[in-house]
Image (cartoon, rainbow, N blue to C red):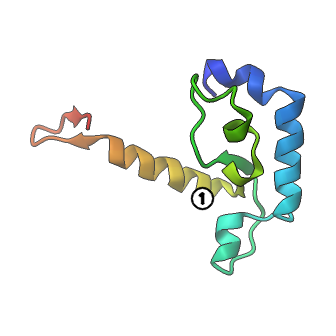
């Protein structure tokens, strides 16, 4: 967890929002459920990544429409796909930023 987010993720507002998102999803991964697979969710994931600029904006950080309840596999896929878009290797095998 990024240092600037520690206070937010330990706040009562976030904990209440996370629980409400979990209840909305019946405790299931929302992405898997859309595919017809009923798998327990684990993580309340922000669709718009939180940054130092937007973490204090409740329309992003606490809005139910901006958060989905997903399983660990879907969360890992999300971040793995994002990292693939950010870095690549050149012909020498060195990491090249976009």
Q: Residues within 10 Å of mark 1 (few under 14, many from 20)?
A: some
The image position of residue 79, as x and y in percent, is 50, 47
The image position of residue 49, as x and y in percent, is 57, 39
The image quadrant of residue 90 is: top left
- Placement of the C terminus among the 4 image quadrants: top left
Residue drawn at 90 percent across, 40 percent down: 16
- Placement of the N terminus among the 4 image quadrants: top right
Q: Is residue 27 visible?
A: no
Residue drawn at 24 percent across, 34 percent down: 95
- Residue 76 as seen in the image, left or right of residue 61: left
Q: Is residue 33 visible?
A: yes
What secondary structure is found at the residue carrying circle 1? helix
The image quadrant of residue 26 is: bottom right
Residue drawn at 82 percent across, 53 percent down: 21
Q: How many marks?
A: 1
Please, is residue 71 above or below residue 14 in the view? below
Q: Which residue is mark 1?
A: 74
Residue ranking furthest to the left: 91
Judging depth in this view, the residue of 58 and 4 nearest the camera is: 58
The image quadrant of residue 86 is: top left
The image position of residue 78, as x and y in percent, is 52, 53
The image position of residue 66, as x and y in percent, is 67, 49
- Residue 89 as seen in the image, left or right of residue 32: left
């Amino acid at each position: 967890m990024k240092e600037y987010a520690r206070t937010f993720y330990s706040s009562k507002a976030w904990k209440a929002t996370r629980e409400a998102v979990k209840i909305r999803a019946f405790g299931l991964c929302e992405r898997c459920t859309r595919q017809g697979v009923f798998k327990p969710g684990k993580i309340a994931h922000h669709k718009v990544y939180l940054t130092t600029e937007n973490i204090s904006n409740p329309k992003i950080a606490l809005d139910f429409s901006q958060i989905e309840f997903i399983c660990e596999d879907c969360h890992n896929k999300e971040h793995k796909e994002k990292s693939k878009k950010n870095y690549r290797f050149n012909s020498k095998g060195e990491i090249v930023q976009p």
